[in-house]
Structures are given as C-alpha cells and as structure tokens.
Amino acid sequence: MMKQPSQLEFGSIVGERYRIVRTLGSGGMSRVFMAEDLKLPGKQWAVKESVAGPQVMKLVRTEAEMLISLSHPRLPRIVDFFEHPPSGAVYLVMDYIEGITLEAYMKGYQGYIPQEQIVPFALQVLDVLDYLHTRQPPVIYRDLKPTNIMLTPEMEFILIDFGIARSYKAELDQDTVKLGTVGFAAPEQYGAGQTDARSDLYSLGALLLYLCTGGKYSEWTAGVEGYIRGELPRHLIPVIRKLLRQHPEERFQSAGEVIGELRRSADFQPAQQGISVNDASMDYAGTRVVAVLGVSAGSGATHTAITVSHYLARRSRSVALVELHSTAKAFARLQEVVEGTSVGQSSSSRRFEVDGVHYWRQTSRADVISLLGGSYRFIVLDLGSGQDNERLEEFLRADYPLVVGSGAEWRVQDIAGLARSLQRHPQHKWNYCLPLATSEAVRRLRKELDHDKVFALPFHSDPFERDDEMDQVLDELFRGVIPDTRRRRFAFLKRRR
C-alpha cells in the first residue's frame, strides 16, 4: 500500500479537468485512479498520484519525461503531467487500459494460461523490450512482473508502471539505486553490477517460468523441472534456461536475439532441397529434439535411435540419447557391456558414454526437461514402441519426429494405421523410416500417406559404426538440419591443390 495518505477521493477534480471515479490500485510509492474527462465526455483516463519526498518526486518527473518521449502500442500514452506543491503530490495522466493484470488473470485461471498463448505473449513483451532497449540512450524497464502487465480483452499485453525504469549509462559500473521485485529481478539489480538490456531479459525468463509452472516458480531451482507443464512447446525450455543465467554474458544479449530464436524454433523446418546450411545457422540457443517411435515391438526403434545419435554426433557433436521408459532394459544391458560389469550389475549412474554420445537410461520426462537446458545440440529420444500419453506427447512435440516401422511388405500398413489413428495431430514434420524396405514399398507408402519423407533404411549391423550407405539416407533425412561437413572438406582439399 501507498505509505503517504492520498490527496484524492471520489469526486475530486485534478487539474481542473479530471474527476476521480474510483481507485484502480496502489503500491509503495503511488496510487492509481480512474478519472473521467470533463472536457471530453465519456473519455476515461488513469491518474497516477505520488506523494512523498523530493527523491520520489524526482523519480516521477523522470518517469513522465521518459513516457512522453516514448511511442509504442504496448506502452501507456501519457497525456498530462503536473505537480501540486502544497501537498507534495505529483500526477501523471495516461491512457486507461481496460483489462486486468496478468497476475489477476493467472489467479482467475488457477495459475493456468493456455499453452498456445505463451509464445505469442513472449513475443509481445519482447517487441516492446526491443523498442525500449534500442532507444538512445537505451531504456531499461527493471520491473517486469505479472502485476506490471495489463491483459486487454483482446489478449493484448501492455506494460505499465515505469516507476523504476532508467536510461542506461555506459560509464557506470553499477546502479546507484537497487530496485526490483524479488524473484523477477536479475542478480545485478542487487548490487552485482549495472542493469542493462540483459537484466530485462532475465526478468522475462522469470516471467515465462512463472507462467510455465502455474505461478509456482520464477527462479530455476532444484526440482523446478517437475512443475513445468508437460504440454508446453518444447523449444521454450532452453530459451527460458538461457534467459535465467546468473551472469549477463551467458544470457541472450538482446531482445531481437530472443525473438529470432523463438521464431526459428517455432517454425523449425528442414531447409528446402539444394539450400546449403552454414555453421552460423547452427548457432541456435536451444537443443533440437529427435523422437524415435516404433510402430510395434521389434520394429527397430532402439537400433535406429542409436544409429541416428552416432550419425549426429559425427556431424555436430553434443548429442544425448535418452531412453524414455522407466522399465526398459536395453540401455542397462549396453551399459554393462561398456563398463564391463556383470549382468544385472549396472552402475548407479544412469549416464554413460559411447563414442561421444551420452546415453541416459530409464529417463523420466522431468529429466528430459533438465537436459534441454544444458549444452546438447541434439537430444534423441528412444520412445520404444509404447504409445502411452507421456511418450506420445514427447513424440508429437519433438522438432524431428521419426516413425520406425517394419519394411516387410505385409507390415507396411502398420505405419499407415498409426498415421490414421493420430490424424487429429499435425503430421507435416513426421519422418517415416522402414528398415530393409524395398523401393516399391517406400513408393506405395509415400503415395498412401501423401508424404514424401519416407525412407528405406539399408542393412546396418552395427549402429555405432559409420556406414556410407546409411549416411546417405540420413543425409537426405536431415537435409538442412546439419551442415554437410564432407562437402566442406572436399572444397578445402581442392583449394590446396
């Protein structure tokens, strides 16, 4: 609550023009009222009153000057500013924004915001942050939190309350005033350095985590993975993790960079045939997920997942292969071979390594979320042939879903049956792999599914080893996703001649 008593009440007239109608809200430094315009009948405004000492007056004047200079559809438009010296009050008159705060919206929905609204919400906030951060000098908001975001009936988000925003001064080592809301403010806002654009990006990460956990968490602490809603877009997790890094240099460096990553992740599609991909295109912030789902037991899902993982490791490094099944035994047996232990005596550690690929046996969804925030470039999920809700959700959400079915003529229809059973879900990203299938079987399935991403996998007895024929198929399957390193090596040798 505002510490100083208000000078206004119902019916009070401010500036000989604005009649107070009701109180909208209050904080430690100010109170906000709705007012009607006596010169423009029917027009309503928000009047922000601050009553305190000279230091607060200076902050309010600074806020007024800043808002007057800004023009953005997601910022309130300031229309009047005046002081009342006898009472020590200062008044800002600005657009009245119809709607509720994001915090109130969350409470009304029991901490739930529809998952399809989260990325558009993030992009809206990033849009206004990008505008603020590219001003000269840059404007740092410093108090991004649910109570400072208004949600309109059209589901548009508008930032309010610039009480602690500041202009970035390159010559300063740290802020002179440490302000912000605990849980949403970046570490440097508590004396670790000067706040800059990356401080606002940290707060955005805290806000997104708050939304993704139903309002339970705004900081990445131990166990938070278990509270992240399972149906959320997968590519959000590594973005949030990077936004919440403790050191500013480890975060995204600009709002524009985050916008690019969110759009690239949401629209992730293989490049068109013939378009080359250079190393720079691989410098994304997040981790790509490849999910391998077998149509039936014995169709070769685990064999294919291992083959794909080692292929990706040879091309791009930083690959994890995850056995997403708490009772599966395949990786446990493999770990016994790798570590030379007796049957049934697997290590207590669920992670082991084979030729640069990190294997994770009997892994849960919470573990996968944690891995997404790490340094892996690719995570390959071995889903086996089970189609329980958890594994099916991971398959449908993956960046690169792979269906593995038998290549035998009499079993090919199993894949078509799976596609029909899941026809309510988008299938444009799906890839179909048929071990040992004939070219005729591939042709027929492509025609039946009306889908060209159907591949016959050649005989490959050792999935850990490189095979030229298998690599040719996987090059085609992952075209545009990873750079063609062999082509560059050839060009390098050619230049040396």
Image: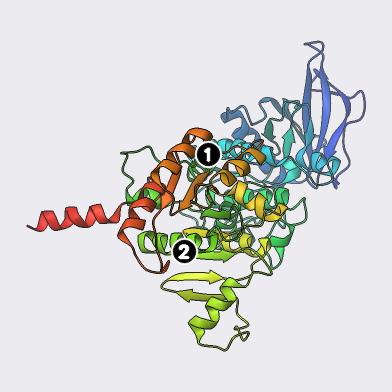
At 56% from the left edge and 36% from the top edge, which residue is drawn?
127
Badge number at residue 319? 2
Color encoding of the figure: rainbow
Residue named by callout 1? 130
Q: Which of 45/234 is in front?
A: 234
Front in this rendered view, residue 159 or 209: 209
Q: Quadrant of residue 296?
A: bottom right
Secondary structure of the residue carrying numbered label 2? strand
Q: Measured from the top left, where is residue 272 in percent x and y?
A: 38, 37
- Give the number of callouts: 2
Q: Is residue 333 above or below residue 74?
A: below
Q: In which quarter of the image is residue 461?
A: bottom left
Q: Nearer the viewer, residue 368 or 4?
A: 368
Find numbered disc 1 in the image and state the secondary structure of the residue it sits on.
Answer: helix
Residue 353: in sight, yes or no? Answer: yes
Cβ–Cβ under 8 Å for marks 2 and 1: no
Tell me the amino acid under the disc marked 2: Val
- Image x and y of residue 183, in percent: 71, 57
Mark 2 vs mark 1, foreground winner is 2
Quadrant including the C terminus: bottom left
Judged left or right of residue 297, residue 468 is left
- Count neighbours of disc 2 (C-alpha within 10 A) and say few if under 14, some if 14 to 19, many if 20 or more: many
Instruction: Kindly identify the residue that appears in the image at 85 percent across and 45 percent down.
Output: 4
Report the Cα–Cα distance between label 2 and label 1: 33 Å
Q: Position of residue 154 (x, y in %)?
A: 72, 26
The numbered dot on residue 438 is: none
Res 273 quadrant in image: top left
For the residue marked with disc 1, what is the amino acid?
Asp
Q: Which of marks 2 and 1 is nearer the N terminus?
A: 1
Give the residue at the far left of this rendering: 497
Furthest residue toward right: 10
Residue name at image x 66 percent, y 48 percent: 208
